[in-house]
Image (cartoon, rainbow, N blue to C red):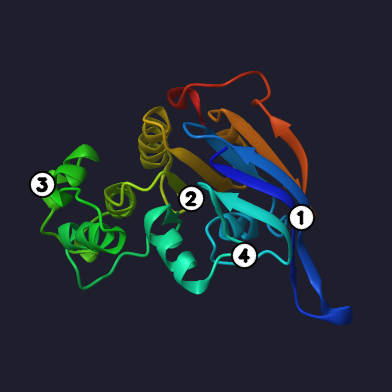
Amino acid sequence: MLIELKDVAKRFGEGSLAVTALDDVQLLIDQGEFVVVLGPSGSGKTTLLNVVGALDAASAGTVRVNGVDITTASRRELFDFRARTVSFIFQSFNLFPGLTAWENVQFGVDAAGSDADPGAVLDSVGLGDNADRFPSELSGGEQQRVAIARALATRNPILLCDEPTGELDFRTGVQILELLQEQAGKGRAVLVVTHNREISRMADRVVELSGGRIVSDGAPRGGKTPVSELNW
């Protein structure tokens, strides 16, 4: 399995002030899977994403990603892991405002030691003509596509997406979801965190969280739905 979580817990704080964000989480995700992690605010879904991406350390249990046990990895190993294994796509885009679209993608190439061509990757997300524009000169949807292009340019096998359509209109959100689904079709594992149940209908699997625990894990209710048929 590309991602394996066993008996994973995550607690913040100490003693009587401790808050349990994840509790006894068991999760397996293979390459090529499009998995939606669904749950309300405070359910632990973003913490789960951060634990998989080694932005947060698990308080207990084992997290193995692409063959690396990140619960016992050294700081240097974690640095290499973040650069070469996982790529994050955030709701707020997180582009560098002083860099052009091309330069933002080149940053991803350099960070991962990839050999991707930033211009070609921007072409693949429909932004080849905007390579010289700065984020402030792009729409929200275009900025998110630059962020996706930067993630793709790393050539990393795992895409971790935190509410990637949260700041976009419906039509643009559908375009972004189609781009992400394409990547799963090419063999990447795509993990999307959202509170939007409608988005879960397009997933291969839906993992529902409540109170830091997985309460269900399986195919979408009613079967997998084409992105074009979603509506919210």
Residue type at the position of mark 4: Thr
Q: Which residue is mark 3?
A: 129
Which numbered disc flags the more N-terminal residue, 3 or 2?
3
Foreground: disc 4 or disc 2? 4
Q: Nearer the viewer, residue 142 or 32?
A: 32
Is residue 92 among the parts visible in the rendering? no
Q: Which residue is mark 4?
A: 72
Q: Which x, y percent locates residue 190?
A: 48, 40
Q: Are marks 4 and 2 in contact (CB under 8 Å)?
A: no
As helix, strand or loop, the secondary structure at mark 3 comes to helix
Dividing the image into 4 quarters, which one contains the N terminus?
Answer: top right
The CA distance from mark 1 to mark 2 is 18 Å
Quadrant of the rendered structure where residue 181 is? top left
Residue type at the position of mark 2: Leu
Q: Which residue is mark 1?
A: 212
Foreground: disc 3 or disc 1? 1
Q: Which residue is mark 2?
A: 160
50 relative to 118 in the view: left or right: right
As helix, strand or loop, the secondary structure at mark 4 comes to loop
As helix, strand or loop, the secondary structure at mark 1 comes to loop
Residue type at the position of mark 3: Asp
The CA distance from mark 3 to mark 4 is 44 Å
Foreground: disc 4 or disc 1? 4
